[in-house]
Image (cartoon, grey):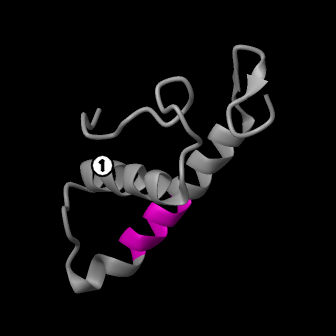
Amino acid sequence: MCRSIKTLRPPALPEEATDDDIRAAALQYVRKVSGFRAPAAHNREVFEEAVDAVARATAELLGGLEVRGRSARGAG
């Protein structure tokens, strides 16, 4: 796994993960899986679509997690 991806749920991250935090993690994941740090022009669209999809899935995951009996993203 990519070591630069940090845990985004409480208590590892004291405050709620921002959209920027989620996108940065998604970008690191796609870079690791694809083997490209920056895709060539002919791969840019599919690379960005993958980052968007991973970011959406990550936000959904974080929004649905329960951490110690409370929602990870909000209500406590």
Q: Residues within 10 Å of mark 1 (few under 14, many from 20)?
A: few
Q: Residue 69 or 32: which is nearer the viewer?
A: 69
Q: Is residue 59 left or right of residue 52?
A: right
In this image, 44 relative to 16: left or right?
left
- The quarter holding residue 61 reads top right
What secondary structure is marked by label 1? helix
In magenta segment, residue 40:
no
Where in the figure is residue 14, as x and y percent of width and height? 52, 31
Identify which residue is drawn at 24% across, 34% down. Answer: 3
- Residue for point 35% across, 55% down: 30
Residue stretch in magenta: 46-53
Q: Say which of 41 and 16 sits in front.
A: 16
Can residue 49 be found in the magenta stretch? yes
Residue bearing mark 1:
33
Quarter of the picture containing the N terminus is top left
Q: Nearer the viewer, residue 31 or 72?
A: 72
Q: Is residue 62 above or below residue 68?
A: below
Where residue 16 sits: x, y (%)?
59, 42
Drawn side of residue 34 relative to residue 63, left or right = left
At 49% from the left edge and 52% from the top edge, which residue is drawn?
22
Image position of 52 with respect to 44: above or below: above
In the displayed structure, 10 sits above or below 41; it is above
Total tally of numbered discs in the picture: 1
